[in-house]
Image (cartoon, rainbow, N blue to C red):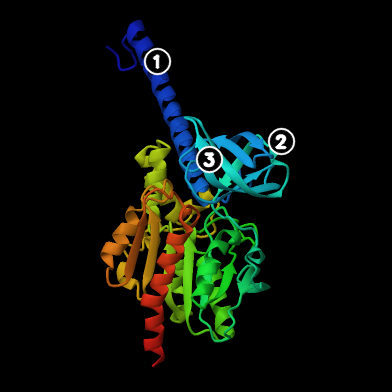
Amino acid sequence: MSRSARPAEDPVQDTARSAGLVALGAGIAAAAIGTAVVGGFVAAVARMVVTPDRKRAERLPIHAVDPDRGTVTLERTPDTELQGRYSLWFGGGTGHLRVGEVLGTTPTTVTRRIIAVDAGDPTSARRGRWGGWFYLTPGELDVPVEDIDVPTPNGPAPAWVVRADDPAAPWAVLVHGRGVTRAETIRAVPVFRAAGYSVLLASWRNDGVAPKSSDGRYGLGSTEWEDIDAALRWLDGQGATSVVLMGWSMGGAVVLQALVRSRYARLVDGVVLESAVVDWNAVLKSQSQAMRLPRVVRKVAQRVLRTPVLHRLAGLEQPVDLRELDMVARADELTVPILLLHSDDDGFVPSAASHALAAARPDLVRLEVAHVARHTKLWNHDADWFDASILAWLTEVVQPRDATSAR
């Protein structure tokens, strides 16, 4: 056979080869599309973690409102069936009423007493939003309130100040959680005033009250602590010498980062955390399981948040490394007494991390556990227990420490 001659092509083999090439090309294309879809999904999950809610959804069905009897009938949920005092927003946030005791239940509904209608007409409302922050302004407590602006890296952040009668009184700085405002923290004002504290109710970036950050994203505590650092700087200028920080939910993560990063942490003599995030990994694991997300999606999303360049997929200007926010792992860095208040049925922030922190630092951490109070609603469910727990800790742990330091 000459070198230029070629064997005859086998039509079947040729067809198979062509089909194989087509299948290979289709497989590569499908893999590329699949990778893009998965990558986009992971990026969306990462963005969801750090993006503030622009609109608070009203998903709770309101079945009936009886103005004559002063009752409201709602869909029965683990939150709405709990005894205590709560808020109900409706009408796109324009309406607000406060509700109290449970008067009756069915398998699907719960009827509660209306304490007050603060805005709007609830009789026309069909859906609402359930909440734990009960008061709208500290003035409702009949206390003297000052409006101040705390200079922060993003601009002036509004705060409320409720001063004690004693100008030399210690201070409490109250730090709200994710998706709410400083009004959430008003519930703790009475107990701190009873203990002789002046109180500052802070706002922080991207909460809808304080100035936004340039990226408009949550740092999950890794950036927001700067605004609490600014509050401590303001208190230092007021001559404060003793401060207790209190944080709810994500506000707990903010407080803990201020405690280990702020140059004014020397002023802090104690920390109270309610339903607090002390380990974001535990929270995201719990939430991803509730959403039935594959473990790999959560793991890759966490890597996206902390990896330079990739963090921009989440809209972040700076990476957020959740490992740095794990205060159970960093428990040896804590130096002041901490009171943890957590409900074991939290439903959003698992109490396991609070238990772990208490076990890691029994010399500093006191854990008070509720069992059916849900997330950030410990005061709502049992205000007497909430107040007594904080007051006992302040008088037994923090104030003796202050007196010792003063000598």
Instruction: Classify residue 386 by image quadrant.
Output: bottom left
For this orientation, the residue located farthest to the bottom is 407
Pinpoint residue 284: horizontal percent, then vertical percent: 41, 48
Residue name at image x 57 percent, y 51 percent: 52
Instruction: Classify residue 210 by image quadrant.
Output: bottom right
Give me the C-alpha separation between circle 3 and circle 1.
74 Å
Circle number at residue 18: 1
Mark 3 closeness class: few <14, some 14–19, many ≥20 residues within 10 Å: few
The mark nearer the N terminus, 3 or 1, is 1
The residue tagged 2 is: 124
The residue tagged 3 is: 103
Q: Is residue 49 visible?
A: yes
Task: Name the residue type under label 1.
Answer: Ser
Q: As displayed, is residue 31 above or below residue 67?
A: above
* Front-most of residues 390 and 150: 390
* Front-most of residues 389 and 322: 389
Front label number (3 vs 2): 3
The mark nearer the N terminus, 3 or 2, is 3
